Each structure stands twice: as structure tokens, then as C-alpha cells.
């Protein structure tokens, strides 16, 4: 029995030895594999885990007007101040915070909140504030010996060079939001990126933003740098943009509109280029360069005049009598009513249970044919022909043919399509039937009809181009930021081509010239002093206010020319919220005089014999 027990014990010891040897061999083999055979792989992984990468922001591309000389938007060097907590000796943190508070003019509690006790052992920089000017950095550098752990690096910011009314076109930039990142992540955007928020800055953000650089170095587990060696990839600046905007015409239009809520669009009809686009009130985009712009932003957001609203493309209004250009096109194209046959205007007509009064209430316009009805803007003529001869279906058809009721696709965000009302729309929207009075309303551009100032400009452009509307655009060229070499040139694109006969458009242009020479705007246009022949149409849109009317003038010049590229279209809208002064034709006269006589605003009003523009009182059409 004793021998059997000894044999069993020896067997167990032998098995245990074999197990130990097996484990030793396995671990030895594994260590050999990891350290010898796969050593380089694990070393690479260890180094990559210990690598810290810092993003180097790229400068955004600059933005120029069509002359490509002085930039409208460029970059200014600004700085970010950071603190590396573990580099500050124990006990000195509060002193460093106090010093930074004075130098940066920031509440010390704000700085302290960014440096909680839980991160005091880390060697990773913590951003304290951005947009720090150079003179502040110079002051910090002079005291750097008493500011351990404090560092700074450059971060360019946008410098908007007194762009005033161009703010709606240029837009502004800001930090990417969580919602924006959700949409843009797959296109290379990351948390902390600066992106365009509105205008050209937003529309062409991917072209303007360039490519960020990277600086990579090896750090230990606390984020402390382990070597002076680092890998650096330089950032690449974004492309420069050249706009179709002419800054001189923009300033002219800005001053001509003045401090009146409204909009101006100056368009080259032969190409679709926007030469000027003004919307008042505007805003100052430099507020977004402030470290904390929330207060200023809130003031602008709460402003009832809505300065962020680009009224040229984002607001729609009744086109009023300017719509009679569309009506005349329909009447001529459909032969709906003989052009030489007259209708008598006695200042009012009766329809349904109400009296419909023309603006010339007594004694009325007398007997008018189509051309004189347009020149005198006679409501009675268009009420009668629209209701009894042209008809609702044709009014809708020609409204849509002129581009109303849909967006043009201009290359800045926020455009609205306006509205061409139909019986189906009325039924769905208000659950009411379309009535004869509704047809009369839209026959003179009232009721629910709504267009933007840009759509009104396109209406005139189509008339000038014998039925072609080129897509309005603001980007002219993309250029290399270093050499200035042209990379992409915008080519005019046809937005719409009408089937209306060129003869109809020729007649319309002649009648629009009659509006200026023998019609409603002879006095405000001051055609004897004006340096160019203008053709156009006024409009006075009721806005539901006591003595409140929108003032329109949609026009072009020169009336006759052999060079289509010489022509410009000007669309002016002055909102009813302003004191009534029928200002749109006056503003248009100033703009045309400035463009074609190469005059400033001040020179133009002197030539035209206008006093201070705010003193000029007009009259209804």
C-alpha cells in the first residue's frame, strides 16, 4: 500500500511538473512572438497610442468684388491663449489665474471654471480664450516668467472691411454646431471647425475653408511631451472668391435706398450677374469675432426690423402695378383684347357688392388703349380685361412663365419662391372658393400674389432678353490664393426660356419706355437731367396699413443699345413700414445716374436736382 501511494504521488508530481513546463513554454513562446517576431508592430501601436495631434487651422480664402483689387473679406491674425495645468507649480494656480484675469480682461471665475482641480495633473493644454489681439499677447510674453504653463498660438479670424450692406451677401462664420456636424461629418467636418453660417461664407464654405494642418508629437500618459521631435503637416489656405458685385454700385444703391426698410437688386440681364444687392436694415458681421457675442447677437435677433433678413430674396410682397407688365404680355400673346381698342376709366367700377376704385378716382383716366393703360397704370383697364377677356388660367400661366412662384436658384441661401395663387391653393389653404374679385385682385398684382425683389428683376430681364432669364449668380471666379491664377469662371446659365414671341417683348419694352416719358414717373425720374434712357414700371402695393403702401419700380437702361452687356436691370422695393414717400423711382433714378454718368451718390442727386432724399415726398401712382 505504501508503495502504491508513493507511485501515485510521483505521478502527480510528474504531471504537475509537466503542466508547469507547458505553461512556461507557452508564455516563453508568446513573449518571444510579441517581443521578437512582432516587436515592431507593438512598438508602433504603443507609439501611436502615445501620439498627441494638434490641429493647425487653415486660413479661409479671401473674397473680392468683381474688380479683384481690394478684398472685401480677408483674414486677421488672432491668438488663442491656453494653460497646461501640470506645468504650473503646486500652489501657484490661483496666482496665475489672477494674472491672466487682468491681462485678458476676463472674470477670474470664468478662467477657474476651465481649470478645475481634477485636471491639475494633466499636461494637455486647456483653451482659456480666443480672438486675443497681438498687443495682449505681447503683454503676456513680457510676463511669461511669472506665468508658468501659459502658452498661445495663432488662429486667423475673418476681417470684414466695412462691408455695410454687403453683410447679407457675404454672411458670417461661426463654430460648427452639433446639428450641423451631424449633417456634415461625412464631408470631413469635425467638432471645433469654423464654418460659414450665411451668405457666400455658407454657400461656398468647402471652397473657402481650405485644409487644416496637423502637428503630432509623442507624449506620456499625462500628456507630457517626451521628445522635441514632431511631425508637422502645414495647413492649406482656401481658394479666393471673386464676386459679380461691383462695390461702387453697391455703395450707390445702399445710399440711394437710405435708411428705409426695403431692398434693391441691380442685375445684368445678359448674364444673370448680380451687380448689387441691398437689403435694409443690415448687420455688422464683425460682432461674431468677439469672444462672447451672445448679447449682441440676441439684440439683433430680437430686433423687430429683422436685420438678418435679406429682403431681396427672403421676403415676398404684392407686385402691385408692376405686375401689369405680365398682364400686358398675356393680353398681347393671347390676343385677348384688341390693343387699339379702348376702355373707359371713370375712376371706379362696380363688381359684386363693392366699388372698385382706380388710383385716379376723379374724373378717372378716360378712354385708354393697352399702351396708355400701362403708362397711366389704370386699374380699371386691367380689372376689366383680366376678368372678362384674359381670364384666370392665362394670368396664372403667364405669371409662372415670368418666373413667379418658384426660386431662381441664386447662389446664396434662403431664397423664397413667392406665391402665384390658384383656386386649388385657396381651397387647400382657406377652404374657400375662388371668386371673381380674386381674379380682379391679381389682375393688378394684389391679393395673395407675392414676389421677391429678385423675381421682379428677373421679370424685367426676361422682357429685355426676348424671353430668356439667366440664372442670377453672385460668384464670378475662383482663384488660387497664392498666385491669383484663375481656376474656375462662372458661365451664364439659362434659367428659363419662354415661348412668347419676340414681337410681344418689343411692344412691352416700348410701352415701358412710355411709362417713363409719358406716364406715372416723369417727375421722379427727371428724364431731362437723367444721363440714360430708362424704361420700367411702377407699383404701389397695399399692405393693410393706414396710409401704408409698398413702393416698387422695376426697370432697365439703356432703353436702346446695340450692346446687350451694357444694359442693367434695377428692381427697388421700399416697404410700407416706412413713411410714405413713393421712393422707389427716385432711388432708381439715382442709381442709373450714378452708373451711367460714373457719379457718386452725392454727385447724382445734385445732377438730378434732388435735395436730401429724406425730404422728397412723392405721390401714389
Image (cartoon, helix red, strand yellow):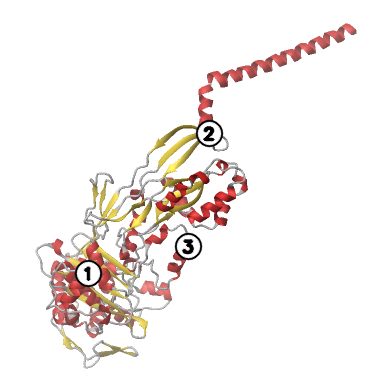
Q: Earlier in the sequence, mark 2 or mark 3?
A: 2
Which residue corresponds to mark 1?
Answer: 570
Which residue corresponds to mark 3?
Answer: 294
Indicate the position of residue 9 as horizontal and vertical percent values.
83, 11
**In the image shown, does 535 or 224 lie closer to the viewer?**
224
Placement of 539 over or under 120, stated as above or below: below
Which residue corresponds to mark 2?
Answer: 49
Q: Residues within 10 Å of mark 3 (few under 14, many from 20)?
A: few
| Mark 1 or 3, closer to the camera | 3
Q: Residues within 10 Å of mark 2 (few under 14, many from 20)?
A: few
Indicate the position of residue 176 as horizontal and vertical percent values.
45, 53
Quarter-of-image position of residue 510 = bottom left
- Rounded to the nearest angstrom, the CA distance separating label 2 from label 3 is 38 Å
Q: Residue at x 27, y 73 (%)?
A: 257
Q: Mark 2 falls on what kind of element?
A: helix
**In the image shown, does 527 or 561 lie closer to the viewer?**
527
Left or right: residue 362 compared with residue 531: right
- Rounded to the nearest angstrom, the CA distance separating label 1 from label 2 is 62 Å
Left or right: residue 455 compared with residue 5: left
Q: Are marks 1 and 3 in contact (CB under 8 Å)?
A: no
Q: Are marks 1 and 2 in contact (CB under 8 Å)?
A: no
Q: Residues within 10 Å of mark 1 (few under 14, many from 20)?
A: many
Q: Residue at x 49, y 57 (%)?
A: 105
Indicate the position of residue 216 as horizontal and vertical percent values.
46, 36
Q: Earlier in the sequence, mark 1 or mark 2?
A: 2
Amino acid at each position: 500500500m505504501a508503495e502504491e501511494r508513493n507511485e501515485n504521488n510521483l505521478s502527480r508530481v510528474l504531471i504537475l511538473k509537466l503542466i508547469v513546463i507547458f505553461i512556461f513554454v507557452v508564455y516563453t513562446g508568446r513573449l518571444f512572438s510579441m517581443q521578437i517576431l512582432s516587436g515592431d508592430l507593438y512598438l508602433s501601436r504603443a507609439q501611436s497610442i502615445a501620439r498627441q495631434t494638434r490641429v493647425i487651422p487653415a486660413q479661409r480664402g479671401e473674397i473680392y468684388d468683381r474688380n479683384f483689387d481690394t478684398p472685401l473679406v480677408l483674414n486677421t491674425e488672432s491668438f488663442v491663449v491656453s494653460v497646461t495645468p501640470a506645468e504650473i507649480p503646486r500652489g501657484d494656480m490661483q496666482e496665475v489665474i489672477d494674472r491672466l484675469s487682468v491681462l485678458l480682461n476676463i472674470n477670474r471665475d470664468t478662467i477657474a471654471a476651465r481649470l478645475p482641480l481634477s485636471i491639475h495633473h494633466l499636461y494637455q493644454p486647456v483653451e482659456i480664450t480666443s480672438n486675443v489681439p497681438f498687443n495682449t499677447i505681447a503683454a503676456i510674453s513680457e510676463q511669461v516668467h511669472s506665468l508658468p504653463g501659459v502658452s498661445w498660438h495663432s488662429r486667423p479670424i475673418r476681417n470684414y472691411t466695412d462691408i455695410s450692406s454687403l453683410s447679407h451677401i457675404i454672411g458670417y462664420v461661426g463654430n460648427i454646431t452639433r446639428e450641423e456636424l451631424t449633417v456634415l461629418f461625412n464631408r470631413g467636418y469635425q467638432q471645433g471647425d469654423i464654418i460659414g453660417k450665411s451668405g457666400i461664407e455658407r454657400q461656398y464654405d468647402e471652397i473657402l475653408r481650405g485644409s487644416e494642418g496637423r502637428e503630432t508629437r509623442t507624449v506620456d500618459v499625462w500628456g507630457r511631451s517626451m521628445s522635441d521631435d514632431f511631425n508637422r503637416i502645414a495647413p492649406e489656405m482656401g481658394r479666393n472668391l471673386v464676386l459679380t458685385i461691383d462695390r461702387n454700385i453697391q455703395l450707390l444703391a445702399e445710399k440711394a435706398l437710405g435708411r428705409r426698410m426695403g431692398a434693391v437688386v441691380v442685375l445684368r440681364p445678359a448674364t444673370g450677374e448680380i451687380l448689387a444687392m441691398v437689403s435694409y436694415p443690415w448687420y455688422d458681421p464683425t460682432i461674431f469675432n468677439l469672444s462672447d457675442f451672445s448679447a449682441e447677437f440676441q439684440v439683433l435677433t430680437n430686433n423687430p426690423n429683422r436685420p438678418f433678413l435679406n429682403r431681396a430674396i427672403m421676403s415676398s410682397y404684392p407686385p402691385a402695378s408692376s405686375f401689369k407688365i405680365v398682364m400686358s404680355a398675356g393680353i398681347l400673346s393671347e390676343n385677348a383684347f384688341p390693343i387699339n381698342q379702348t376702355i373707359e376709366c371713370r375712376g371706379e367700377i362696380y363688381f359684386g357688392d363693392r366699388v372698385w376704385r382706380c388710383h385716379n378716382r376723379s374724373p378717372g383716366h378716360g378712354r385708354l388703349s393697352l399702351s396708355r393703360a400701362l403708362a397711366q397704370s389704370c386699374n380699371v383697364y386691367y380689372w376689366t380685361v383680366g376678368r372678362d377677356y384674359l381670364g384666370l388660367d392665362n394670368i396664372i400661366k403667364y405669371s409662372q412663365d415670368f418666373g413667379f412662384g418658384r426660386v431662381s436658384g441664386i447662389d446664396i441661401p434662403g431664397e423664397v419662391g413667392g406665391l402665384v395663387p390658384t383656386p386649388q391653393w385657396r381651397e387647400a389653404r382657406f377652404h374657400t372658393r375662388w371668386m371673381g374679385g380674386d381674379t380682379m385682385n391679381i389682375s393688378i398684382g394684389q391679393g395673395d400674389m407675392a414676389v421677391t425683389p429678385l423675381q421682379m428683376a428677373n421679370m424685367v430681364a426676361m422682357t429685355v432678353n426676348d424671353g430668356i432669364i439667366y440664372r442670377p449668380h453672385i460668384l464670378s471666379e475662383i482663384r488660387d490664393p497664392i498666385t491669383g491664377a484663375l481656376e474656375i469662371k462662372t458661365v451664364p446659365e439659362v434659367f428659363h426660356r419662354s415661348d412668347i414671341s419676340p414681337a410681344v417683348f418689343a411692344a412691352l419694352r416700348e410701352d415701358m419706355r412710355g411709362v417713363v416719358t409719358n406716364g406715372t414717373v416723369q417727375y421722379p425720374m427727371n428724364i431731362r437731367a437723367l444721363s440714360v434712357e430708362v424704361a420700367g414700371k411702377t407699383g404701389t402695393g397695399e399692405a393693410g396699413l393706414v396710409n401704408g403702401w409698398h413702393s416698387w419700380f422695376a426697370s432697365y437702361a439703356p432703353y436702346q443699345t446695340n450692346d446687350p452687356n451694357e444694359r442693367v436691370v434695377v428692381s427697388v422695393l421700399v416697404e410700407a413700414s416706412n413713411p410714405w414717400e413713393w421712393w422707389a423711382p427716385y432711388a432708381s433714378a439715382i442709381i442709373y445716374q450714378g452708373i451711367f454718368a460714373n457719379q457718386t451718390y452725392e454727385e447724382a442727386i445734385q445732377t438730378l436736382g434732388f435735395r436730401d432724399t429724406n425730404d422728397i415726398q412723392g405721390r401714389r401712382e
